[in-house]
Amino acid sequence: MKKYVMAIVSIILLTCMACGKQENGESVTSTFPADEENTTTTEIIIQPTTSVTETTMDPGIMPNTAGIVVKATTTAKETTTAEIPDDERGIGDLADNNIRLADEDAARLGVSKVLVLQTISNCTWNTGEDIINKFNELLVTKYGCDFVVGFIGANPEVDEKGYTYYHFLEDIRNLGQQADIIMSGAPAHYTRLVEDGFLLDITEYLGSEEGEKLYDAYSEEVWELVRVEGRIYGYVPRKLPSYVNALSCNREMAEKLGLNIEAGYSFYDIGNMLEAVENLKEDIAEKVILYSDSGYLEGMLGYYNMGRGIYAKKNEDGSWTAFNATENEEFINLWKKVREYKEKGWLRTDETAYDAVEEGDFLFAAIQHYYSDRAIEDKLVMVVGKGPYAHKTVYEVIPGEWFYSYYTGVEDFVYGVTTWSKYRQEALELITLINTEPELANLLVYGIENKHYSYKDKLVRTLPTSDGIAMGDGDMYVFVNPGLLLAQCAEPENKAEYYKEVAAKFEASPLCEYGVSQLEFFEFLEDYEQRSTLHQIYAQGYEKLFNGDYEDVEAAVAEINRMQKEAGIDELIDAFNTQMFIKDVE
């Protein structure tokens, strides 16, 4: 893994407050991330010391005409108490409803080995005993296993004592508690667990006859997400390595307007199409003419978003160069086009407009989709309604420019076999089975057919039952291969192979190509004093630019650029280009 030495940039700043919207499922009005450091960051260590708050910047305001409010940030150092007894650490910290052990199944089925798989509590909370019983029966009687499996669930969070998810996993190991397969999660990130010796290196296993079955279950691109210096220590249950970005035209609406639209049109082409429609607003009153989110717009120019207003472009020789978007004519022209569409009353970026898209009341929609089954060929799949009344609806669309976000290594929701497991071989067999056998995967995620769910017309419907629930919320939080789950809506029957084909269209980010993990990337940024100030400028200013909120785009861009330079963006760009974007020399 790369290590960096970065000079601290000494810039005196008048600073103030972070703003910016954070993702909430797919119902979003912005894809600008909340600051990774947050306005206040917390470092948890196990030492009996008192809480200390360190102010990292002088408080004050950075005056500007772009409507951006920047605040000073603080770093709070809190500690856990050393008085937590051992029986309340690790597994002892879990609620009973998150523990599903399998000793009775072992006795009933005549086996002596009981494995423990640890996952997020969403998967184990009130899970039906009949589901786990049937799962273990299948393992022993159908798949010839000499073991059964119990499950424990825990969330990556900090409790009131400062007890973190890393402490939870650390205590399981140090106290000799059983967990044969564990899940990574903040602050127990994947690369940290690898570095600290929690996870078994499975690279050789994946090259074996049995291991090849597991390796073949995912695309090469998905495996790239979990490579650490060329080695693999776990798997991440994903169908695709990153996001699908889709510009779509509602076919039914277009036909009503007499629009003859050919596939492959761009965001820039939409203006000419709309200009050709007489009485456009009257003809589709109460409908959304064009909805876009910033995720689609940020990526449509083909650059990788490094955050803080910095993007990276790939050069002809394969190298990457970081640059400031406010100094790039392509971005400036895009922001002008966004403003033009908004001034004409076409463009909307608010959450109410997104709700209208879900209901099918739209003409054009440009969306970065966080679920891989939402945009498939000439189909757009949206979730209509909220909570238990939500359901998927398929809309026929004319696809415009669709593109695929760059992928980079993942840190959370990676599953691996523990180095202290006494059932290592059995654990490898288990993760292979749940990633290659559809029967096992669907049982865990949906439960028993016609008891916990029904499947008809390519839709899974949850059935009411008093006997507990299944482990999955669709393919959310699953620890099985989601490519094995029942095909729904627009998904083809051979969905596993379909997603492999789509995955091949994705390209690696510069972080992947230069061997930089996400954790290393944020550690790199920690050496840069003004990272939070730049993020606040980016989160607020760029959001307004991509929403078309500035009347005078050029003036706003100039002001944001001035603020960025005052905050030292040039030094950070130089650091990326001279320290991060370089190949290791063997």
Image (spheres, rainbow, N blue to C red):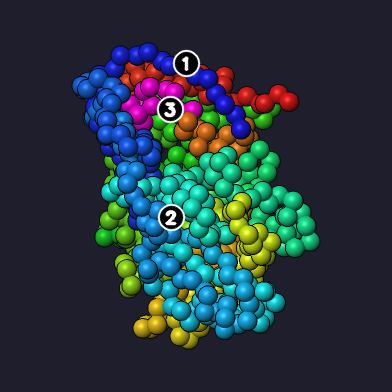
In the image, residue 535 lies in the stretch drawn in magenta: yes
Query: Magenta region, mostly helix, strand or loop?
Result: helix
Kindly identify the amino acid type of the residue bearing the numbered disc 2: Gly
Q: Image point 52% across, 51% down: which residue? A: 173
Give the magenta-colored segment's residue range: 524-541
Separation of marks 2 and 1 at Cα, in angstroms: 39 Å
Q: N-terminal of the two: label 3 or label 2? A: 2
Kindly identify the amino acid type of the residue bearing the numbered disc 1: Ala
Q: N-terminal of the two: label 1 or label 3? A: 1
Other-residue count near label 2 (Cα within 10 Å), few / some / many at <14 / 14–19 / ≥20: many
Label 1: state its secondary structure: loop
Disc 1, disc 3: CB below 8 Å?
A: no
Which of discs 2 and 1 lies nearer the camera? The answer is 2
Image quarter hosting the N terminus: top right
Which mark, residue 526? 3
Label 2: state its secondary structure: helix
Q: N-terminal of the two: label 2 or label 1? A: 1
Other-residue count near label 1 (Cα within 10 Å), few / some / many at <14 / 14–19 / ≥20: few
Per the image, the residue denoted by label 1 is 7
Q: Is residue 86 above or below residue 546?
A: below
Other-residue count near label 3 (Cα within 10 Å), few / some / many at <14 / 14–19 / ≥20: some
Q: Image point 57% across, 81% down: which residue? A: 107
Q: Position of residue 60 (x, y in %)?
A: 20, 21
Image quarter hosting the C terminus: top right
Label 3: state its secondary structure: helix
Q: Is residue 348 above or below residue 398?
A: above
One can see residue 432 in this view: no
Q: Position of residue 271 (x, y in %)?
A: 41, 45
In the image, residue 377 lies in the stretch drawn in magenta: no
Kindly identify the amino acid type of the residue bearing the numbered disc 3: Glu
